[in-house]
Image (cartoon, grey):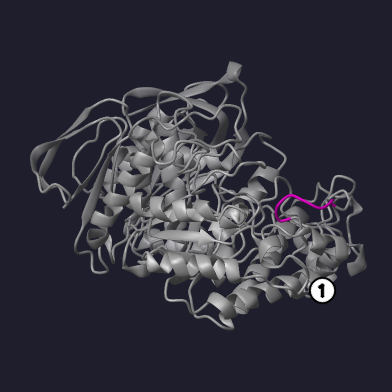
Amino acid sequence: MLGGRLLHGGDYNPDQWLAYPEVFEEDLRLMKEANVNSVSLGIFAWASLEPEEGRYELDWLDHIITRLGGEDIQVVLATPSGAMPHWLTQKYPEVMQVQADGKKNLPGKRHNFCYTSPVMREKTAAIDRELSRRFGKRKNAILWHISNELGGNFGDSTCHCELCQKAFREWLKEKYGTLDNLNRAWWNHFWSHTYTDWEQIHSPGPLGEMTSTALVVDWRRFSTNQISDFCEMEIRAVREESDLPATTNFMDFFKGLDYNRLKKGLDVISWDSYPFWHEQRDEVPVAVRTAANHSVMRALKKAPFLLMESTPSSISWRNNNPLKRPGMHMLSSMQAIAHGSDSVQYFQWRKGRGGYEKFHGAVLDHKNGSNTRTFREVSEVGARLEALSKNVEGTVNRPKAAIIFDWENWWALEDTQGPRLDLDYVECVLSHYRAFWEKGIEADLINMDADLTGYQVVSAPLNYMYKSGYEDRVRKFVSDGGVFVTTFFSGMVNETDLCFTEHHPLEDVFGIVPEEIDAPTEDFENYFVYEGTRYPARKMCEIVHAKKGTEVLSVYERDFYAGAPAVIQNAYGDGAAYYLAAESDDLFLRTFYDTVFKKADLKNALGTELPYGVTVTERTGVDGDRGIVFVMNFRNEPVCVEGTGEWTDTESGEVYKGKLELEPFECLVLK
């Protein structure tokens, strides 16, 4: 836990208010009133820090850091590469990105720069070193915040300039060694795509090649590598004068970058959470998605993470941007802590007067100072976090279940042609994750390279691609007693998107022989019965044959594949594997996973059934001691959880026996 306490604060942009020194004095007073103990500084301040090339003006930032330290407010020091000053793009236009169609961007936006550009790297490293020399050893500095939302520039996150094309070819040479190897891996005899010279290879684009799926996946891998390398370059620059840990802020299921690669240079994982609360009256789907994102971030390093940005009220970029209803800010903040965050931080402290985000929610509005509902609710969160710090210090969630969520699988799956063109990997993963969430069974979201040791249940929905070595890890996991679940359209291709031939790579584990995949329209929707209830089989229905000894739990009812297995269970070694041949609905997944959890003897921390909209998480110490249990009600109405045994409220000291009564949008913290 940084600084020995849960962090509460967020992005502070005093560079926008330098002409109004009285604003800073008011900010300082109100930060203490709001129980703010940490702020992030300088994220988009390059033009104020270096108004012209080589001339640094850091005294204003020095003054602010010093005054914050005097009030026991810690600072997260940001590098400002997220937005370039105009002097940089004017003098060095080559630093700006080139789009996939070959057009060079104009100045402006965020992350509008080439990650390969030597000039951009030189100028970024120079300002980073200067910040590190001046502030890297300050007593109240606790963390480096590298750039901002890397890859997020309101469009393609990559640059396609000639420098990037050259770097891409060099990356491919290192990976494949020879053109013959590359041509075989990409199946380039198709449509005469065989390359005879490395210079013939170009990034995918709308005016050229976009149908070579292996090319597209490798371009995404390369782009992730370039952006990760840029981030690591910045970390090396600030580390020249500072030994502070480093992070960069990730985003909600961001497809552009594989965070499993980007994490490697970071000491701490952080992310920006902006759920669409109150889009509909049922908050559960949004709660599930947000929880899943928290689970991704926590699982990246199996350690506490930071909620780097959130909003205390509303955001500004959707068609409609509802305010958080009373109680939701506290609940959504506690949800982050419950899933392993050691902070609740906001974008931003004070609303700007102009610009793109002038109506984005903040702790302080344009008017009324502290006399707002938002300010009062933020102050309550800060006070609660301060009181909870001693209980959660040294703890994190340690789930016994995992769900495979792999970026490379995501890229390949959604780029494939057929059986359907509307495959949504994230939504499929979330539908399975929801079954865990509703039961209060925590799950890490991990990629295919992760170690499966220690898990009792692993689920792998739409696991289309099998990366090298993955099937061996799955086979060992099940053989050693684990319970593994996968679905239709899994184990189809290798890591260069070449289809497996002859048999499914885990045919022995699942006890199946796949034959065909139907993608029926609504008029041809099929059905199957599972544990006495009839469920739909739709969108994708795989026709498989059960091998001898495999247990068929359900079969299709209709069409030419009536009687074919729809749900299969196979004993393998000391464990069991399940294969879901058809896509169904949430009701089926809820019932199915109930069977799986019983098979694995997996229960939630309360050991009881949960009402709809209520979930449970647990943070424990290194040795599984000091368990702190969070019980969250995402319904805007009171609920009662029965059969809970005896628990003590860590905050009030109240003892609950046999049941828990929760108010609307309430979170209880128990031991």
Q: Residues within 10 Å of mark 1 (few under 14, many from 20)?
A: few
* Residue 328 among those drawn in magenta: no
| Image position of 175 (left or right of 281) | right
Front one among 219 and 114: 114
Q: Is residue 136 above or below residue 464?
A: below
Q: Which residues are magenta?
A: 105-111
For the N terminus, the image quarter is bottom left
Front one among 478 and 308: 308
Front one among 68 and 606: 68
The residue lying at 32 percent from left, 57 percent from top is 397
The residue identified by callout 1 is: 178
The residue lying at 16 percent from left, 53 percent from top is 671
Total tally of numbered discs in the picture: 1
Mark 1 residue type:
Thr
| Image position of 591 (left or right of 581) | left
| Image position of 174 (left or right of 288) | right
Q: Is residue 448 above or below residue 588?
A: below
The residue lying at 32 percent from left, 32 percent from top is 613
Can residue 438 be seen here? The reply is yes
Residue 132 in percent (x, y) is at: 58, 77
The residue lying at 80 percent from left, 64 percent from top is 88
Residue 441 in percent (x, y) is at: 31, 46
Indicate the secondary structure of the residue bearing disc 1.
loop
Q: Is residue 469 above or below residue 310?
A: below
* Residue 110 among those drawn in magenta: yes
Most extreme residue toward the top is 523
Residue 10 in percent (x, y) is at: 47, 54
Residue 294 in percent (x, y) is at: 43, 51
| Image position of 640 (left or right of 376) | left
Image quadrant in which you'd find residue 333: top left
